[in-house]
Amino acid sequence: MKKFLLFAAVLGLFACQAKHDGYTIDGTITGENVAAGKVYLTNFSRTEPISDTADLVDGKFKFEGKVVTPENYSITVEGIEGRIQFFLDNSPIVIEAAAEDFANAKVTGGVTNDLVSALRKQHEEVAAKFGIDSLMREYSEPATTKERKDEIITVYNQMQKESNAIDSVFFAVNPNSFYTIIQLAQKVEDYTIEEMEAKVAAFKALPEFTGNRYIGVIEESIASLKALQPGMVAPDFTMNDPQGNPIALSSVYPKNKITMIDFWAGWCGPCRRFNPTLVSIYNKYSKDGFGIFGVSLDKDAELWNKAIKDDKLTWTQVSDLQYWNSAAAKLYHVKYIPQNIFLDSEGKIIKRKVSEEELEPFLKEYLGIK
């Protein structure tokens, strides 16, 4: 506990640093034949990609600007392998890199980058204490027994518990940091809708978050989740089946007592490993009114069709072949697969995210099967 409190005090010091109107990045690269070239600064957003270019002159480069949405960025240099990653907000950053070890450059400054670096170091120390890297390699070995895998999972869960405690301290001390809002955007469902609305309101009250993309992301998630509460009529959508025929969700659930929308993909290993179990459950309970509506997040029609055939999926399948940009996945706030949601015969939502272990008991209870 003392260590966590000390960590909190250190983070608090970072959080109190002065704000700046924009960022500066001053970089130096050492090594042979790196005196000149192009340097590229980019973020990692698919929805709002941002990039800038600077010249490397005598091993030095400089970027200046202002970010509306502070987040993770990277720097790459033509002719040099690897990339330097860091959190960019509107504050000064200094980078010192060696061409032969470019990815491990020294990055100093940057209010949020210092904050995130301290947090990352804490997580690395916890992982090292438990020897997680070697344990994960052991877990993946074919010779590792189930008993040993269970032991490794137990150790991993202990490590995760300590890591979560570190995160809890961070978020308590830095409730309105630029890093915090990104993490909240990924963990919207860890809180009630009312809690998330209060957190968003707190961010929106701060001028430095004006125009921040993650506020919109969280608000969209909240709107989606409100529409997915038990008892709500499931949002309807229409997609094509493998033969190109449009199939509406609303044309499927009236045929069943209970319908599972199964979000999956042919490229998804966990989905494919679960499919034999799902086929068995479907064959067992379909006569009692259990139906499935498969929604694929594939982008390759050939792979999708082959997976349907190989896994013997006999229920209705649809996809817009848009990968993670799947319209249905966005509508249903699907951030990972496999994932499911269950509807009654009127299209009202019964439950979301039923696990593999819960699935058969859940169906038996709903269908009244002893």
Image: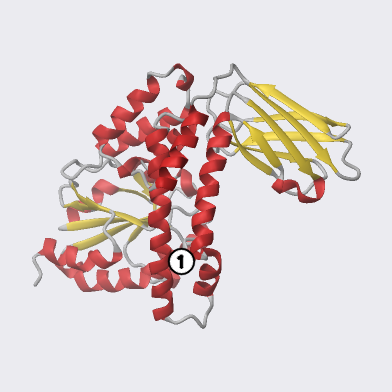
Quadrant in which the C terminus is drawn: bottom left
Few, some or many residues within 10 Å of mark 1 (<14, 14–19, 20+): some
The image quarter containing residue 233 is top left
The image quarter containing residue 66 is top right
Instruction: Identify which residue, 201 or 216, lies in the foreground.
Output: 201
Work out which residue is located at the far front of the displayed protein and give it. Answer: 2
Q: Position of residue 205 (x, y in %)?
A: 37, 18
Asked whether the viewer can see residue 302, the reply is no
Q: Residue at x 55, y 64 (%)?
A: 133
Instruction: Identify which residue, 356 or 306, lies in the foreground.
Output: 356
The image quarter containing residue 339 is bottom left
Figure check: 76 above or below 240 = above
Q: Position of residue 109 (x, y in %)?
A: 64, 31
Q: Residue at x 31, y 68 (%)?
A: 278
Figure check: 365 above or below 50 = below
Work out which residue is located at the far right of the displayed protein and give it. Answer: 33
Q: Position of residue 67 (x, y in %)?
A: 58, 24
> Would you name the residue on which mark 1 appears?
307
Figure check: 319 above or below 135 = above
Q: Residue at x 43, y 75 (%)?
A: 149
Left or right: 83, with 325 as reference point:
right
Instruction: Identify which residue, 364 or 44, lies in the foreground.
Output: 44
Instruction: Give the total of numbered labels.
Output: 1
Q: Please, what secondary structure does the residue beneath circle 1 have?
A: helix
Left or right: 54, with 332 as reference point:
right
Left or right: 246, with 16 as reference point:
left
Give the residue type that dot 1 points to.
Ala
Asked whether the viewer can see residue 171, the reply is yes
Q: Residue at x 39, y 46 (%)?
A: 329
Q: Position of residue 241 (x, y in %)?
A: 39, 54
